[in-house]
Image: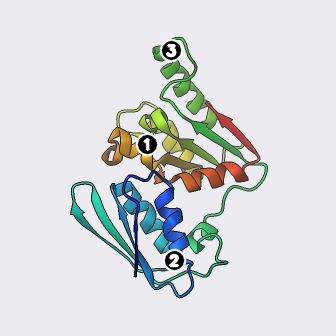
Amino acid sequence: MKTIDMLGQPCPIPVISAKRALAEKEADGVTVLVDNEIAVQNLSKMARGYGLEFSYREEGPARYAVTIGGGIPTDAGAAPEDAAKPPPLSGSLIVMIGADHMGEGSDELGRTLVKGFIYSLTQLAVPPAAVIFFNGGAHLTSEGSNAVPDLRELAGKGVEILTCGACVNYFGLKEKLAVGEITDMMTITTRAASAGRVITI
């Protein structure tokens, strides 16, 4: 079984490297070394999507060995899990929020504005397909954020609420996520690339 060292590698490099290793001819599995729990979760999602065995062990502080058993066809493309939850159709709207405030000048005013913006999304006749949070925007999906009730309302309407896993890890918010799911950069890229329109604030 092949071992690949992804210590210190940012999302989505560990997942992409694992998929490549599993797609190699006669692959019987792979062990991936990573340095954070978010990477472990992302590898777990990928393994589940392909129906592969998954396990991991903590080898020390900030060191995990993730083992994925089996292989995937080189022409497999998207994982079955991804196929069951396809990217938004062309013409749909994706909203990407990269800060806990909106605009420049006054952060206090900006936090009021971003709260109003998210509330306004709940009032649209056709809501966005997904709202994606990255960098400082990850704080908006966490406990204590006044945007959480509106985001939960959006989630109840079928809107995907996705927060960048690397960002959650960086800000120490993993245990504080209050709405939606943690995701990886490959999913964010796929959602944005397949959207008909993208709004970034």
Which callout, 3 or 2, points at the residue further toward the start of the chain? 2
Q: Is 170 or 191 nearer to us in this picture?
A: 170
Q: Position of residue 51 (x, y in %)?
A: 49, 80
Distance of mark 2 from mark 1, alpha carbons? 27 Å
| Residue drawn at the location 44% of the way across and 65% of the way down | 43
Whether pointer 3 and pointer 2 mark residues with C-beta atoms closer than 8 Å, the reply is no
Q: Amino acid at mark 3?
A: Leu
Quarter in which the C terminus is drawn: top right
Q: Is residue 124 visible?
A: no
Q: Position of residue 85 (x, y in %)?
A: 61, 64
Q: Amino acid at mark 2?
A: Leu
User: Which residue is labeled 3 in the image?
Assistant: 109
In the drawing, does residue 146 fall left or right of residue 96? left
User: Which residue is labeled 1 in the image?
Assistant: 167
| Residue drawn at the location 35% of the way across and 64% of the way down | 33
Which callout, 2 or 1, points at the residue further toward the start of the chain? 2
Q: Is residue 45 visible?
A: yes
**For residue 143, which quarter of the picture?**
top left
**Of all residues shown, which one is farthest toward the top?**
105
Which dot, 2 or 1, sits closer to the camera? 2
**For residue 32, which quarter of the picture?**
bottom left
In the drawing, does residue 62 fall left or right of residue 74? left
Distance of mark 3 from mark 1, alpha carbons? 23 Å
Residue 22: assigned label: 2
Judge whether 50 appears above or below 166 on screen: below
Residue 187: assigned label: none
| Residue drawn at the location 53% of the way across and 88% of the way down | 26
In the drawing, does residue 199 fall left or right of residue 134? right
In the drawing, does residue 114 fall left or right of residue 58? right
Quarter in which the N terminus is drawn: bottom left
Q: Amino acid at mark 1?
A: Cys
